Amino acid sequence: MKQVVQNYKSGELAVLDVPVPGCKPGGVLVRTVYSLISTGTEMMKVSEAGMSMLGKARSRPDQVAKVMQSVATNGVPATYRKVMGKLDSYTPLGYSLCGVVEQVGAGVDDVKVGDLVACAGNEHALHAELNWVPKNLYVPVPDGLAPQHAAFGTVGSIAMQGVRQGEPQLGEVALVIGLGLIGQLVVQLLAAAGVRVVGADPDPARCELAERLGAAACGDPASTAVENAVAELTDGHGVDQVYLAAGGGSNQPVELAAKLARDRGRVVDIGKCRLDLPWNAYYEKELDVRFSRSYGPGRYDPSYELEGRDYPIGYVRWTERRNLACFLDLAARGKVDVEPLISHVADFDDAVETYRRLKDGELKAVTALFRYPEQAGEAAEAKVPAVAVPAVQVKASPARAAKTPVKLGFIGAGNYATSMLLPHLAQREGVELSTVVTTTSLSGANAQRKFGFAKATTDLDAVLGDESIDAVFVVTRHSSHAELTRQALLAGKTVFVEKPLALTEDELSGVLAAVEESGNDRLQVGFNRRFAPLLQEARTHFGARSGPAHLRYLVNAGRLAHGSWYLQQGSEGSRFVGEGGHFIDTASWLLDADPVSVYATATSGNEDLQVVLRYPDGSTATISYVTTGPSGFPKETLDLVADGRALRLDDFVRASVYGRKKWVSSRLPKARDKGQNAELAAFIKAVRTGGPMPVPLESLVATTAATLAVQAGLAGGVPVTLARP
């Protein structure tokens, strides 16, 4: 894709070909339709890049202070290399756009592919064909609002936050100093709130525009026109609020604010202007000076902007995202008119030339927009997404000598570990439970007491750095599986990780990179159902097949208890990503192949899923994953039909095969055996003997990729190809 960038050292502007950003959980991938050029903020940055090093230093004294601190801490040579390296790098431009959702990340349920959204942020709403935007930095565009108008969302939020800081009341009078883009929007917002507005700007065209958009009077701040208008509208008392929306190095705006504000009036700084407050003037009127921080509460808070943690509306009424939505609503209802502010629309391919014309003054504009080419072919391709199945590349590891006892380390000792794994291992001959690592001291002490671990600790290195430990079990929350697995593989351990192996394609690639780097492919994921004795026996009675098969798997998952960490989709992935690998692995094992495509659909809210897997020989597997079924109904039922035969599994209690002969298993006790004990036996044998792992790594990777493809399929509403190298 293409993106506008700038080298801050040389001032060079360019449109570069860069990789498409990944669609991470908690956000959406957006294809830009229009992006807005801020002729104030952006052009200031472009102008600074063209300055000499001394000019850059003078324009950014805050950065100079940081450099001096670094010199004191790290010395001149190291600081010089750091500063020059940072300067001589491409940086992005842009922070306000409107685009179409191309892909929806895990944990996002308020938009879908094809929706029009307005996006904000100088790291996420860039002048680029595609942007990944976290949840709190985009909002759906209201019906009827044109995309070029929705592209004003960010600057509209900046203006709105400034107005909120002024706390205007019906019938008050306000002065807006600086009638550029932000100033024009502030004028309209104040007028919509029932405030009479006086504007001040040396540009007559901007004054005329502000009057057309709702200002009562405007004029040059150096003339008497502004002062006279304020006196007339306020009976000589002065304005209730002053909004500083001007830039530059002049102190005139601050001085004018003190002169024309009433006693105990409010002065709100929105723009980046000089603020040498004349003490006497501000003291005598006891003026209230306030700053407006960009788009609103949430700005510069990583937990809000990147992690999607909203602020409770009862405590923070107007957040960054709510401001954005409010401004778009006003624009959609005609309360704010941004069309007159659009001075120029340029094709995105002409970005460099557009910036040059703006910088040289050849193009005079309140606002300019970049219009992006219609990507009909690319959009169609994006709606048929592909999830990569990474190639497994590893040098064959040397065979290990048989060893007894096998020493195990556990990372995590939660409910699953203590109920389904450790009871089998604690009583297994030839196994020694060496060390358990937990985040809380008490859980580790409990595991040590119950299962006989030699050591309990909260120090991860106690397991990964202990050469005597042969294998490591990763039984933690889903978000940590991939990273802990990667570290354990690099430490040379054989690894058993509970499902899922990874929550994203990047995490999966990271695990395989560790395999390739270390040469250690000794990995097992806790897909236990293929080891269930009843299902193994039924598969044997079913026998080999020659033609395509159809498999149907109904999973009556049920509802989770309120507060379950499984519901934390933003950090732990969707529920299906967490446990769906079980059912995909079982289907692939029964069909003796890995899937080549995935189609997924869901009810509202993605509670109940229907997943269709297609296999190379034409076989299909349909997994119905439901959370709304009755609690008394069996959790898992499976049917496999091929070559005139049928296999049926009833919740790991009874199995049957129909063909020339009928086979029916005896009914098992209520304690269903889903294969954990047999899986652990196979894993321990592989560790002790150095023989092959119970499941080939290629199969583990293919199942994980197919599980991840379900989310992409839900977002796109079309089949997802599982692309292999």
Image: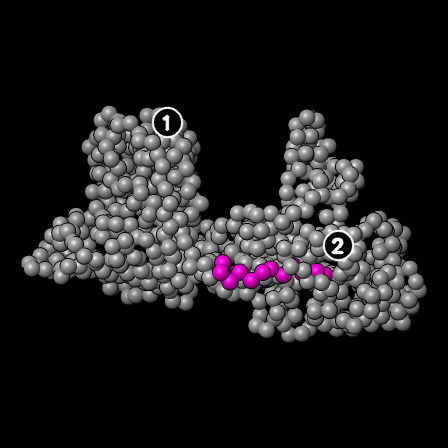
Q: Position of residue 259 (x, y in %)?
A: 89, 59
Which class describes the residues within 10 Å of circle 1: few (<14), some (14-19), or many (20+)? some
Q: Amino acid at mark 2?
A: Arg
Q: Position of residue 301 (x, y in %)?
A: 60, 50
Q: Give the left or right position of residue 548, taking residue 264 as reference.
A: left
Q: Is residue 342 above or below residue 407?
A: below
Contact (CB < 8 A) between labels 2 and 1? Answer: no
Q: Residue at x 41, y 54 (%)?
A: 386
In the foreground, 715 or 290: 715
Residue 705 seen in this snapshot: yes
Furthest residue toward left? 661
Number of numbered discs overlaid on the protein picture: 2
Q: Which mark is residue 357?
A: 2
In the foreground, 386 or 113: 386
Residue 157 seen in this snapshot: no
The image quadrant where one finds the C terminus is top left
Distance from Cα at disc 2 to Cα at disc 1? 64 Å
Q: Residue at x 28, y 66 (%)?
A: 630
Q: Secondary structure at mark 1?
A: loop
Disc 1 target residue: 466
Q: Earlier in the sequence, mark 2 or mark 1?
A: 2
Q: Residue at x 74, y 41 (%)?
A: 62
Q: Is residue 373 above or below residue 333?
A: above
- Span of residues in magenta: 367-379
The quarter holding residue 210 reads bottom right
Indicate whether residue 163 is drawn in magenta: no
Indicate whether residue 368 is drawn in magenta: yes
The quarter holding residue 194 reads bottom right
Q: Secondary structure at mark 2?
A: helix
Q: Position of residue 421 (x, y in %)?
A: 27, 42
Furthest residue toward right? 224
Q: Amino acid at mark 1?
A: Asp
